[in-house]
Image (cartoon, grey):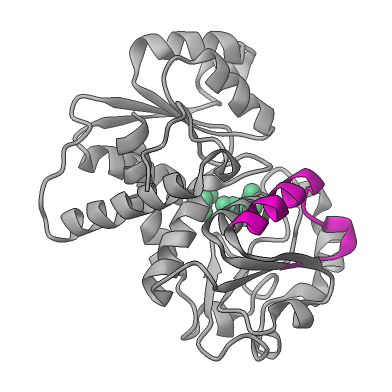
Amino acid sequence: EKKPAKKDFLTLGELTSEEIRFLLKDAVYLKQLQKSGKPHPFLQGKVLGMIFEKSSTRTRVSFEVGMYQLGGQALFLSSRDIQLGRGETIHDTAKVLSRYIDGIMIRTFEHEKVEELAKHATIPVINGLTDAHHPTQVMADLLTIYEHKGKLQGLKLCYVGDGNNNMCHSLLEGAAKVGMDMTVACPAEFAPDETIVNHAKETAQETGSVIIIGEDPFEMVKDADVVVTDVFVSMGQEAETEEKLKKFSAYQVNESLCKYAKEDYIFLHCLPAHRGEEVSPEIIDGIHSVVFDEAENRLHVQKSILKNYM
Ligand code: CP
Ligand code: NVA
């Protein structure tokens, strides 16, 4: 394991396997401290600014509570209220915030915006979701899988649904780095980004895992240890709702599909979920589902990220 070397936490593809393991280990440590009621003010006096251009429940609350538990403070900066929303540039926002605070978490649309912010900010930038990546969520997913399965390497994860999706992309990068096999079941027209897939396949070769993208959910889910899905209609895609729901009707995670997974599979969903669309109530509310452990782990992994980047 190795402490992350980069200034910013933008995608899992930019971290090494050792850095991912280091952050997960520190998350386990921080989780133990918090559970046993021991104060852990590693970020005393530090302030995180949180820019939100999209809605959030988990990301907003877990980052804010995480900063508080680490002895620091968080500022909620809705783009509706700050000048960024009225056309002030990312460049100027980055320069100004760097003079006041110690780190920025941003949730936005184009991934390039986060890269630009990181380029001009002298303080660490953490990606709290873009159209293309959701790396803090996948760190929480990896921790959750590890807690339930006792390992990551050698497991098989199957993602079912929209492949051209931030969760699918970050899972591909994360699975490859930790040596987990991953299959994606999606309609051909909603396949994940080719560059991300190719890069994940290269990484997988080094870590000894296999990445497969296919159209048949039954084939892809076969013998999976972990079954994952996400909403069919992501934030910003509201206009495509009707069309997407039609095209994804064969990709619901339900009992007839999960019969093909391993008997002791676990089900993950980053939430918010749409019961009856991407997942049936029996699965998300059933005994294989660990979605609330997963949601809780956002807090613990993000505290690890904050502690090691800020
Ligand atoms: N999973 C997740 O990022 O949830 P929020 O949109 O509520 O932050
Ligand atoms: N893919 C979803 C994830 C929400 C946390 C979205 O971008 O809306």
Residue 204 lies within the magenta run? yes
Percent position of residue 240, x then y:
82, 51
Question: Residue 151 or 184: which is nearer the viewer?
Answer: 151
Q: Is residue 107 above or below residue 211?
A: above
Q: Residue at x 63, y 85 (%)?
A: 261
Residue 187, relative to residue 64: is it above or below?
below
Q: Residue at coordinates 37% horizontally, 70% vertically from top-left?
A: 147
Where 138 falls versus 290 (above or below)?
Answer: above
Quadrant of res 190:
bottom right
Question: What main secondary structure does the magenta stretch of the protein show?
Answer: helix
Q: Which of 78/63 is in front?
A: 63
Q: Which residues are magenta?
A: 184-206
Q: In the shown orientation, is residue 18 left or right of residue 87?
A: left
Is residue 165 in view from this perspective? no
Residue 23 appears in the figure: yes
Whether residue 192 appears in magenta in the rendering, the answer is yes
Residue at (80, 65) in percent of width and height: 245
